Image: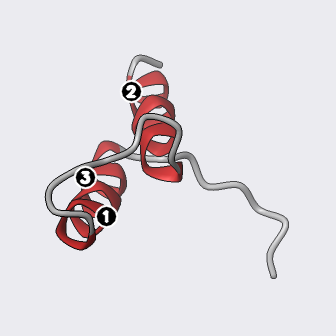
Amino acid sequence: MSNQKTPMTPTASARIQSSEAKNNSGQVAKDSFTARAQRAAEKNSKK
């Protein structure tokens, strides 16, 4: 495992959200990894 950190991108976040939504009848839980990924992508895109 690498020690490098790669910032979350909106594209990666969308891919994660799509996968979770497909597995959960279109729903994404508010406290899920997917939600955290979306917040991180939004934060990183503002830089």
> Residue 24 sits in which quadrant?
bottom left
Cβ atoms under marks 2 and 3 closer than 8 Å: no
Judge whether 38 appears above or below 19 on screen.
above
C-alpha distance separating marks 1 and 3: 10 Å
Quarter of the picture containing the N terminus is bottom right
Where 27 sits versus 46, above or below?
below
Q: Amino acid at mark 1?
A: Glu
Residue 33 vertical placement versus 36 (above, below): below
What's the colour scheme? Answer: secondary structure
x, y (%) of residue 8? 49, 47
Q: In the rendered view, would you say 28 is above or below 15?
A: above
Mark 3: which amino acid? Ala
Percent across and percent down for residue 46 are 40, 17
- Of mark 1 and mark 3, the one earlier in the sequence is 3
Which SS class for mark 3? helix
Q: Indicate which disc, 1 or 2, sits on the residue closer to the N terminus.
A: 1
Taking the image as shown, residue 26 lies to the left or right of residue 36, namely left
Mark 3 and mark 1 in contact (Cβ < 8 Å)? no
Earlier residue among tags 2 and 3: 3
Residue visible at 25% across and 52% down in the picture: 14
The residue labelled by disc 3 is: 14
Residue 7 placed where, x, y %? 56, 46
Circle 2: element type: helix
Task: Look at the numbered discs 1 and 2 and tell me whether their residues touch, using CB distance below 8 Å.
Answer: no
User: Closer to the observer: label 1 or label 2?
Assistant: 1
Q: Which residue is mark 1?
A: 20
Q: Amino acid at mark 2?
A: Glu
User: Alpha carbon of mark 1 to alpha carbon of mark 2: how far?
Assistant: 18 Å
Q: Which mark is residue 42?
A: 2
Q: Residues within 10 Å of mark 1 (few under 14, many from 20)?
A: some
Which residue of the protein is positioned furthest toward the front in this rendering? Answer: 25
